Image (cartoon, helix red, strand yellow):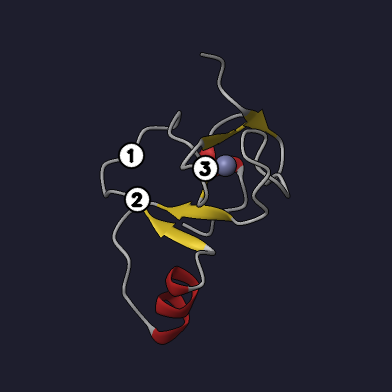
Amino acid sequence: MDKNVYKTKPSTCPACGSAVIAKILYGYRKMNPELIKDVNDKKVVLGCCVTKPDFPAWVCTGCELPLYCEGGWRLSGHEY
Ligand SMILES: [Zn+2]
């Protein structure tokens, strides 16, 4: 199966058409009200602490399709 690779976060899912694409945050995160709100709003999904550069940068919240950033998730505008 081909990976879905993008330069910037796609506005809709190529598989199901959902417009709710969440950014995956990797690494240890201090939970704060803003982050909790983003998680509840499905803007953000918390990834695991062990990361690889080729992990997906975003995920569709409709069908859970992983979406990859060209050059790796570190280049997708994540503040890490
Ligand atoms: Zn989808």
What residue did someone put label 3 on?
57
In the rendered structure, the answer to whether residue 55 lies left or right of residue 31 reads right
* Tag 1 secondary structure: loop
Is residue 17 placed above or below 80 in the rendered structure? above
Asked if the residue at tag 1 contacts the one at tag 2, i.e. Cβ–Cβ closer than 8 Å, the answer is yes
> Observer-nearest residue: 1 or 29?
1
The residue shown at (51%, 13%) is 1
The residue shown at (44%, 73%) is 40
Q: Amino acid at mark 2?
A: Gly
Q: CA distance from mark 2 to mark 1?
A: 8 Å
- Considering every residue shown, the one lying at the far top of the view is 1
Is residue 3 placed above or below 13 in the rendered structure? above
Q: Amino acid at mark 3?
A: Ala
Q: Amino acid at mark 1?
A: Thr
What residue did someone put label 1 on?
51
In the rendered structure, the answer to whether residue 19 lies left or right of residue 49 reads right
From the top left corner, tell me how far across and down residue 25 is, in percent: 43, 55
The residue shown at (28%, 48%) is 48
* Tag 2 secondary structure: loop
Asked if the residue at tag 3 contacts the one at tag 1, i.e. Cβ–Cβ closer than 8 Å, the answer is no
Dividing the image into four equal quarters, which quarter contains ligand 1? top right
Q: CA distance from mark 2 to mark 3?
A: 10 Å
From the top left corner, tell me how far across and down residue 42 is, in percent: 50, 64
Residue 47 is labelled as: 2
> Observer-nearest residue: 63 or 3?
63
